[in-house]
Image (tube, helix red, strand yellow):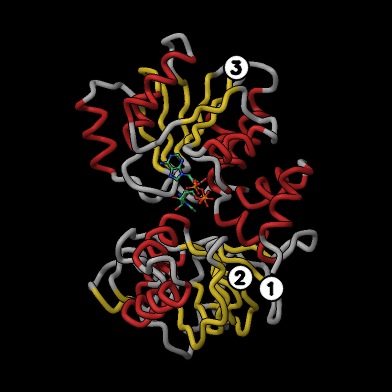
Amino acid sequence: MKSAGTRYGTHRVIEPAGALPQAAWKVDNNLPIDPSEMLIDVEMLNIDAASFTQMKEAAGGSAEGVANLILDTVEKRGKQHNPVTGSGGMLVGRVREIGSAYDGPIQAKVGDSIATLVSLSLTPLKITRIKKVFMDRDQVEIEGHAILFSSGIGAKLPVDFPRDAALAALDVAGAPAQVYRLVRPGMNVGIIGTGKSGLLCAAAARKMLGNTGKLFGVVHIQSIADEVAKYGYFDEMVLADATSPVAVFEKMNALTGGSLLDVTINTTNVRGTEMSTVLSTRDGGIAYFFNMATSFTAATLGAEGAGKDVSLLMGNGYAPGHAEATLDLIRSDDKLMKLFGARYSS
Ligand SMILES: NC(=O)c1ccc[n+]([C@@H]2O[C@H](COP(=O)([O-])OP(=O)(O)OC[C@H]3O[C@@H](n4cnc5c(N)ncnc54)[C@H](OP(=O)(O)O)[C@@H]3O)[C@@H](O)[C@H]2O)c1
């Protein structure tokens, strides 16, 4: 019988003993698989945006440099778990083998294309070759294998999406799913950062608000503000740098007549944006941190220091039904369908 530890992958943890695979420094990525596991031939990694941004900076913008950082991390840790940001990403590939005792939630057979919905930061991964680094979309084409535990969620790839578009959408599926839970008609809602997850959150928030409330988008570059405004989700685009908390607060304060935001959603991919999120939120409101470069201490101690009675919500990447809800959101919106199709076709 499978132990609880095997279900969560503790049998693959090399160090420190007793840790779960996400918290582990190093996991065993070698074959053969345990009977409780599923083996995947990996085709594409979708690196988490905070991690990719950090590696791009560290490599001075060089694709070869990013590839070397990924190879080094996977060699040292047995998984693509960025040691600086602590974040991972997701992958797509084909099922090569299903262990005789695998009883996980993924209904797939050998040969099926699937996307994992658990982080690369806990997924045993071996890379034999990096074929291409897509610098403009955080994706990396590789040859190699990954191992999924029985507890790991995943999804068969939808037939109506290009593979890499589905991968990109599923990577951030937790964010719009959470927006459906948090946003109610009549609210003032702010989205800081309007990239991939920010636009999905905006589309989800607009659906929840209908013609009520107000939706604000915080963007740090005018040309992006102009581009994003065309989607028609936002009532106001706010030009401000999320790493400048007082500037963001002053704009939000003025635009809301001092009432501030009921819900503020941080989808940026950089550090130092905690307090623009907290200060923009009214007392009793919710600051939702989807950004993986968020510091727990900066948010909590910063909120305390500013005397802000704001609920701080961490961006759990999982919510029941999040994958289908996000794909449905894109399907329901021609503009999103076009954006994802165009940006992520290989
Ligand atoms: N919680 C989870 O489970 C989970 C899962 C996946 C991803 N994530 C995280 O979610 C975040 C967003 O991911 P994504 O894929 O949506 O990233 P993305 O497409 O790269 O979007 C990030 C956006 O933030 C903007 N931004 C950067 N610095 C800014 C600043 N100072 N002020 C205002 N905007 C700024 C970027 O603009 P420019 O590109 O113009 O700089 C970009 O539009 C990342 O931190 C990622 O790691 C979390």
Image position of 218 with respect to 102: above or below: above
Q: Quadrant of residue 141?
A: bottom right
**Left or right position of 214 against 277:** right
Label 2 sits on a secondary structure element that is strand
Image position of 251 with respect to 223: above or below: above
Quadrant showing the C terminus: bottom right
Badge 2 or badge 3: first in the primary sequence = 2
Res 340 label: none
Q: Quadrant of residue 131?
A: bottom right
How far from the left and from the top, in percent, is residue 34? 47, 84
Mark in front: 3 vs 1: 3
For the view shown, which residue lies furthest in the front direction? Answer: 223
Q: Are marks 1 and 2 in contact (CB under 8 Å)?
A: yes
**Left or right position of 83 against 182:** left
Whether residue 39 is visible, yes or no, is no
Q: Are marks 3 and 1 in contact (CB under 8 Å)?
A: no
Label 1 sits on a secondary structure element that is strand
Amino acid beneath label 2: Val
Res 113 label: 1
The residue drawn where x is 72% and y is 57% is: 342
Quadrant showing the N terminus: bottom left
Determine crowd level at label 2: few under 14, some 14-19, many 20+ residues with C-alpha closer than 10 A. many
The residue drawn where x is 52% and y is 82% is: 130
**Left or right position of 301 against 140:** left
Res 92 label: 2
The residue nearer to you, when weighing 35 against 251, is 251
Badge 3 or badge 1: first in the primary sequence = 1
Q: Which residue carries the number 3 mark?
A: 213
How far from the left and from the top, in percent, is residue 332? 77, 42
The residue nearer to you, when weighing 247 against 83, is 247
Between the C-alphas of marks 3 and 1, the distance is 41 Å
Amino acid beneath label 1: Ser
